[in-house]
């Protein structure tokens, strides 16, 4: 098992929950892990991996159970009340996801969110790569490519790369792929800063809560990523529910307890060597002409390791293997 060999001193994270946010929409569908109430200044320096996983897992399991129940009760027509309601909710979610995928076909080729990326599938997308060979070795922790395209009312993103498999007995990798989005460059009046984040509860949340040092004009609105990769034929995904290891977090809405964005609104699918995701432009709160800034990193479970040496876009300021300083953003302009 490989572990991060370098750790920076724990930062005294301030519990300054930033409420202001330019991004509208998505609020109603945003979820929140039950353990979030614990997040705060007093807990900021206390790293409890196992506890975080258990706390958020309960929440995710509840959502998954609801979907599963509906799926195994096709005779909803015979049942009034609760069963019918559950089915309705599931159908709505499934339809939304299917429609989004189908609509993409109006501008071929169609992107299929399955955790497998090809040039043909992502033809026409912006594409940047990281040429720095990961110091971890093949198949471990690496970032290779980033692809983005806006169409059909959604921002589509592919991250080619991976984190190492979870240690025995865990569903979470030691590390996580973390990505951060500013939805209104160059404005700095909305969004939050990395030092203002204080959510330490939840698998991906804890990793996202990392003290990266972005360019001066960057403010955080959304974070997304994963704490686990899939295996062949079995991707890791937030699907129509919540999985605390993977997906989108509306950080600017509550930097102390990141609201989770439901998988039907922002599905994310991680395969063996790539993650694919899309999110509604209305959830991002962006319209034509808006410019977005994005960067991707790898950190550890507690978001305090910056020595992966892997960056997207590739950053020339990886000094001594540290990726904490961010000098290059991938920019996206909404057509
Ligand atoms: Ca795909
Ligand atoms: Ca901004
Ligand atoms: Ca959380």
Image: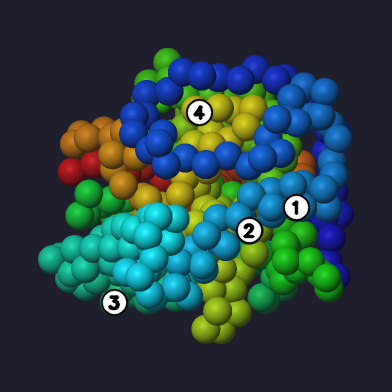
Q: Residue 53 carries which label?
A: 1
Q: Which circle's residue, 4 or 3, is located before the other in the chain? A: 3
Q: Nearer the viewer, mark 4 or mark 3?
A: 4
Rounded to the nearest angstrom, the CA distance separating label 3 from label 2 is 36 Å
Q: Mark 2 points at which residue?
A: 61
Dots 3 and 2: beta carbons under 8 Å? no
Residue 191 placement (x, y as % from top left): 47, 24
Residue nearest the observer in this picture, 131 or 170 = 170
Secondary structure of the residue carrying tag 1 is helix
Q: Nearer the viewer, mark 2 or mark 4?
A: 2
Image quadrant holding the C terminus, namely: top left
Q: Name the residue under label 4.
A: 252
Q: Residues within 10 Å of mark 3 (few under 14, many from 20)?
A: few
Q: Nearer the viewer, mark 3 or mark 1?
A: 1
Residue farthest along the left direction in this orientation:
106
Rounded to the nearest angstrom, the CA distance separating label 3 from label 1 is 37 Å
Q: Which circle's residue, 2 or 4, is located before the other in the chain? A: 2
Q: Which residue is drawn at 24% across and 71% down?
A: 110
Q: Mark 3 points at which residue?
A: 120
Secondary structure of the residue carrying tag 4 is helix
Residue 102 placement (x, y as % from top left): 21, 68
Dots 3 and 1: beta carbons under 8 Å? no
Rounded to the nearest angstrom, the CA distance separating label 1 from label 4 is 23 Å
């Amino acid at each position: 098992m490989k572990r991060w060999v370098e750790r920076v001193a724990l930062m005294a994270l301030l519990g300054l929950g930033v409420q202001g946010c330019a991004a509208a929409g998505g609020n109603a569908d945003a979820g929140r892990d039950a353990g979030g109430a614990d997040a705060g200044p007093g807990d900021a320096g206390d790293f409890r991996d196992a506890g975080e996983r258990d706390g958020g897992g309960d929440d995710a399991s509840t959502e998954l159970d609801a979907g599963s129940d509906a799926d195994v009760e096709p005779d909803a027509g015979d049942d009034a009340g609760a069963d019918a309601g559950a089915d309705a909710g599931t159908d709505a979610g499934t339809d939304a996801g299917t429609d989004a995928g189908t609509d993409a076909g109006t501008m071929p080729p169609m992107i299929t969110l399955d955790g497998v990326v090809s040039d043909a599938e992502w033809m026409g997308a912006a594409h940047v790569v990281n040429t720095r060979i990961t110091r971890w070795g093949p198949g471990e922790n690496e970032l290779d490519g980033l692809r983005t395209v806006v169409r059909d009312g959604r921002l589509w993103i592919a991250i080619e790369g991976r984190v190492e498999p979870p240690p025995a007995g865990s569903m979470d990798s030691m590390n996580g792929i973390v990505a951060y989005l500013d939805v209104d460059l160059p404005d700095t009046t909305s969004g939050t800063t990395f030092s203002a984040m204080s959510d330490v509860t939840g698998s991906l949340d804890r990793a996202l809560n990392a003290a990266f040092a972005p360019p001066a004009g960057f403010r955080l609105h959304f974070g997304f990523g994963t704490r686990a990769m899939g295996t062949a034929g079995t991707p890791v995904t937030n699907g129509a529910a919540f999985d605390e290891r993977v997906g989108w977090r509306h950080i600017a809405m509550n930097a102390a307890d990141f609201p989770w964005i439901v998988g039907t609104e922002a599905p994310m699918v991680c395969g063996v060597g790539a993650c694919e995701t899309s999110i509604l432009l209305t959830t991002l709160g962006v319209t034509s002409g808006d410019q977005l800034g994005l960067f991707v990193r790898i950190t550890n479970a507690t978001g305090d390791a910056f020595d992966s040496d892997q960056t997207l876009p590739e950053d020339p300021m990886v000094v001594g293997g540290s990726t904490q300083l961010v000098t290059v953003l991938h920019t996206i302009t909404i057509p």
